[in-house]
Amino acid sequence: MKRTRIIVGVAVAAVALGTGVSYAVAQSDDDGTEQRIVGADLERATAAALASTGGGRVTGTEVGDEESYYEVEVTLDDGSQVDVQLDRDFAVVGSSADHEDDTSDRD
């Protein structure tokens, strides 16, 4: 009876660990180096980015972006996306529309 409980406990732990690893991998970028903003920094970065764009919703974040210390992706109400670049003090240092170039539909 005790051995069965141990086996079941180990199996449950393995499933839980595997799910966590899968989630972490699914949330990473293509090369596995992207780190999301978390905690109080996420709240401050979100507030700064949304103030800069005049609204919308945050759909992605990154610490240590190649263009700035923080990057916050905001999706506006019209569906367009803006990448807001922030410095370590959460000041906006730049922003750019996030366009996907698809020229296959052009004649």
Image (cartoon, rainbow, N blue to C red):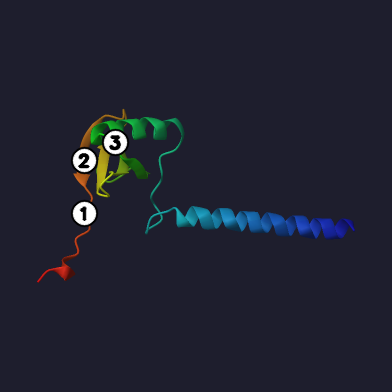
Picture quarter containing residue 71? top left
Residue for badge 2: 95
> Looking at the image, is mark 3 or mark 1 earlier in the sequence?
3
Q: Is residue 88 above or below residue 66?
A: above
For this rendering, which residue is in front, 49 or 30?
A: 49
- Disc 1 marks a residue whose amino acid type is His
- In front: label 3 or label 1: 3
> Looking at the image, is mark 3 or mark 2 earlier in the sequence?
3
For this rendering, which residue is in front, 8 or 78?
A: 78
- In front: label 3 or label 2: 3
Extreme residue in the left direction: 107
Picture quarter containing residue 42? top left
Residue at disc 2, secondary structure:
strand
Residue for badge 1: 99
Determine the residue positioned at 30% across, 34% down.
Answer: 50
Determine the residue positioned at 71% across, 56% down.
Answer: 12
Determine the residue positioned at 38% across, 49% down.
Answer: 34
Residue for badge 3: 55
- Tally the marks: 3
Residue at disc 1, secondary structure:
loop
- Marks 3 and 1, how far apart in space? 19 Å
Q: Is residue 63 visible?
A: no
| 2 with respect to 71 (left or right) | right
- Marks 2 and 1, how far apart in space? 12 Å
Q: Label 1: how many residues lie within 10 Å, few (<14), some (14-19) or many (20+)?
A: few
Determine the residue positioned at 35% across, 35% down.
Answer: 46
Which quadrant is home to the N terminus? bottom right
Q: Label 2: how many residues lie within 10 Å, few (<14), some (14-19) or many (20+)?
A: some
- Disc 2 marks a residue whose amino acid type is Ser
Q: Are marks 2 and 1 in contact (CB under 8 Å)?
A: no
- Disc 3 marks a residue whose amino acid type is Gly
For this rendering, which residue is in front, 100 or 14?
A: 100
